[in-house]
Amino acid sequence: MLKIGLKDCLCCGESLPVAAQFGNFNGRCASICLHCEALSVHDAVSLTAETIGKRYRMLIEDKSTRLEARRAAKRAAYDVHGKRCACCHHYKPTDHYNACQSRADGLQPNCRVCDALRVTLLAKPGGLATWRLTRAALRAAAAQLQIAAQSDVARQSGHYQTET
């Protein structure tokens, strides 16, 4: 079986057989096919600009498709357990978060409740210190809830022995 090597023309963007469609200059294969080599300079530049535009649009479409697929996968995982708020450390559904295009999952790290509380406290005098204390208290409460939930699971599964 004869295997034919293909090469992409830099001008028109088509994949063509190397031996038949590309010229040979000083032992090196040309980057432009014989058809594009015969075009006038103006036509070749126009064709090359179209080709580059098509490749760029395909690259952008592919990139946005992959981004949406990654975001959908993250959101599917959040549907099971919820997303963890960066402030209060509670797990909440995705509809409790605002959109943020620059984030990998497309959501802000703080839930809407914590964000509103932060804005309110920071607007007051001495707000930064108050916000930090409030955030620490919210995180401590979340840790206590998590410990209580883990001990409930242990009791239900029989791993937790009570003294009699």
Image (cartoon, rainbow, N blue to C red):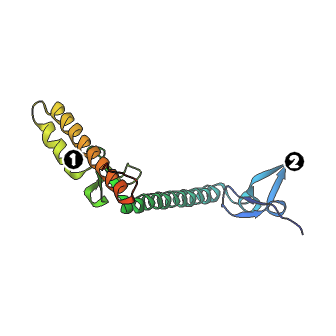
Classify mark 2: residues with Cα within 10 Å, few (<14), some (14-19) or many (20+): few
- Residue 85 seen in render: no
Residue type highlighted by circle 1? Cys
Q: Is residue 42 visible?
A: yes
Residue pictured at 45% horizontal, 60% vertical:
73
How far is mark 2 from mark 1, CA to CA? 68 Å
Dot 1, how many residues are within 10 Å of its Cα: few (below 14), some (14-19), or many (20+)?
A: some
In the image as oriented, which residue stretches furthest toward the front?
A: 164
Looking at the rendered image, the disc whose residue lies closer to the viewer, 2 or 1, is 1
| Residue 131 image offset from top left, x and y in percent | 18, 36
85 or 11, nearer to the observer = 85
Report if the CB atoms under discs 2 and 1 are less than 8 Å apart: no
**Nearest the camera: 52 or 104?**
104
Quarter of the rendering occupied by the N terminus: bottom right
Q: Residue at x 74, y 60 (%)?
A: 38
Farthest-out residue, right:
1
Secondary structure beneath dot 2 equals loop
Q: Which residue is mark 1?
A: 114
Which amino acid, mark 2?
Gly
Q: Which mark is residue 160?
A: none
In the image, residue 122 above or below residue 97: above
Left/right of residue 12 with respect to residue 33 in the rendered view: left
Residue 9 pos. (x, y %) = 70, 58
Q: Nearer the viewer, residue 114 or 3?
A: 114
Tag on residue 27?
2
Q: Is residue 85 above or below residue 11?
A: above
In the visual, does 147 lie left or right of 26?
A: left
Secondary structure beneath dot 1 equals: helix
State which tag comes first along the sequence, 2 or 1. Answer: 2
Q: Is residue 64 above or below residue 118?
A: below
Query: Horizontal and vertical percent for residue 96?
Result: 26, 57
